[in-house]
Image (cartoon, helix red, strand yellow):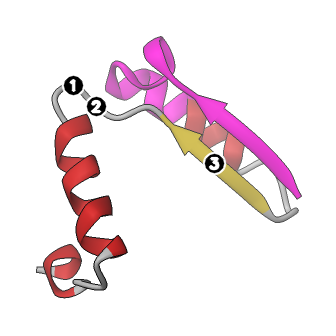
Amino acid sequence: MIVMKFGGTSVAIPENILKVKDIITRYDELLVVVVSAFGECTAQLQELAAHALDGDYKILFS
């Protein structure tokens, strides 16, 4: 298993996200990929995580 973390400028613009995709797709092994949240998404991700912890999965897929 390989763990990769991309953040900051790695996901800041579409061109860089494509570079990350190119890096990830080079591997045939099991990957865990961690990326920074875009812009103002951190609060939304925290809210979704709280719902998931409470077992409320419906909100995650609506």
Q: Which residue is mark 2?
A: 38
Q: Quadrant of residue 47?
A: bottom left
The three-letter amino acid code for the residue at tag 1 is Gly
Q: CB under 8 Å between callouts 1 and 2? A: yes
Residue 6 in percent (x, y) is at: 58, 29
Per the image, label 3 sits on a secondary structure element best described as strand
Task: Classify mark 3: residues with Cα within 10 Å, few (<14), some (14-19) or many (20+).
Answer: few
Cα distance between the residues tagged 3 and 2: 15 Å
Q: Is residue 7 or residue 14 the one in the foreground?
A: 7
**Residue in view at x 58 percent, y 34 percent:** 20
The residue labelled by disc 1 is: 39
Crowding at dot 1, Cα within 10 Å, few <14 / some 14-19 / many 20+, comes out as: few
Who's the residue at 27% across and 49% down the image?
45
Residue 46: give x, y in percent of width and height: 27, 48
Q: Is residue 35 magenta?
A: no
> How crowded is the residue under tag 2: few (<14 C-alpha within 10 Å), some, or many (20+)?
few
What span is in magenta? 1-19
The reply, left or right, for residue 26 in relation to residue 20 is right
Q: Earlier in the sequence, mark 1 or mark 3?
A: 3
Q: Which secondary structure lies at badge 1?
A: loop
* On screen, residue 26 above or below 43: below
Residue type, numbered disc 2: Phe
Q: Residue at x 51, y 23 (%)?
A: 7
28 displayed left or right of 31: right
Residue that carries the numbered disc 3 in the rendered image: 33
* Horizontal side of residue 2 vs 54, given as left or right: right
